[in-house]
Image (cartoon, helix red, strand yellow):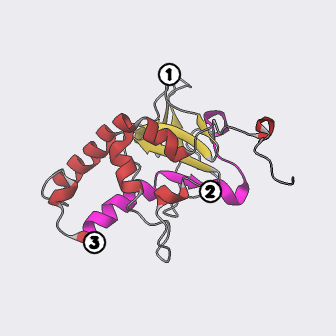
Amino acid sequence: CSCTENIDMSARYVFKESTAISYLQKYSDTYSEYLDILFKVHASPVSETTVGQLLTARGHYTIFAPTNEAIQAFLDEQVAQGVIPEASWDAITDQTKRDSLREIIVLNSILDGTSIDRYFLFYDFPNNNEEFLINTMADKKISVVFSPDDPESCMVDGTCPIDVNNRDIEAINGCIHQVHACINP
């Protein structure tokens, strides 16, 4: 008499919000390149956890997510500078160089605000030509520059425009801002 097949359904909850990774996966047509390298870059030199895995968990991340076109432009720039022979990950035969380029893209694109218990929405950004309170995961400072003609127009680190229509995308573990260039301080 202690067992029953009648399950109380009133206490169930359906998870409706997205993590940062689930949002990026939902729009994989725009972020597939970024998603791919998020799961190839380790969160730290002493950890086997990838940044992609980290973004599935709790936290307060501000993510400046580059589009596929932004990553391709970054690779094109590396070819023009003679760093790599061809604008393709497969063409980079030196594993150390390939890992280094992936780390530049990923670790400079994320602010981990877990220690200060916050992420940065557009209205929380620092003033013009000022730096964010926290460093990127690459331990670099990045700043913002606002257009004098349009206060809604902003660039991260002076060269990476934030998409006006795809910013302040809140997830349960942070906020995503689409950028049209890779941050490379």
Query: Residue 124's image quarter?
Result: top right
Q: Which mark is residue 134?
A: 2
Look at label 2 and name its amino acid.
Answer: Ile
In the image shown, does 13 or 34 lie closer to the viewer?
A: 13
Q: Is residue 90 above or below residue 169?
A: below
Give the SS element for disc 2. loop
- State the extent of the magenta-drawn residues as a range: 96-124
Look at label 1 and name its amino acid.
Answer: Asp
In this orientation, does residue 102 appear?
Answer: yes
Q: Nearer the viewer, mark 1 or mark 3?
A: 3
User: Label 2 vs label 3: CA separation?
Assistant: 27 Å
In the image shown, does 10 or 120 lie closer to the viewer?
A: 10
Give the SS element for disc 1. loop
Quadrant (top left/top right/bottom left/bottom right) for the C terminus: bottom left
Q: Estimate how packed mark 2 is, as few (under 14), some (14 to 19) or many (20 or more) residues with alpha carbons within 10 Å.
A: some
Q: State the residue at coordinates (13%, 53%).
A: 86
Q: Main secondary structure of the magenta part?
A: helix
**Quick one: label 1 or label 3, which is nearer the N terminus?**
3
Left-right relation of 8 to 152 = right
Q: Read off the residue under disc 3.
A: 96
Where does the image place residue 67, in percent across and percent down from the top left?
37, 39
Residue 120 part of the magenta segment: yes
Q: State the residue at coordinates (31%, 45%).
A: 71
Give the SS element for disc 3. helix
Residue 2 part of the magenta segment: no
Q: State the residue at coordinates (49%, 70%).
A: 44
Where does the image place residue 81, in percent across and percent down from the top left?
19, 55
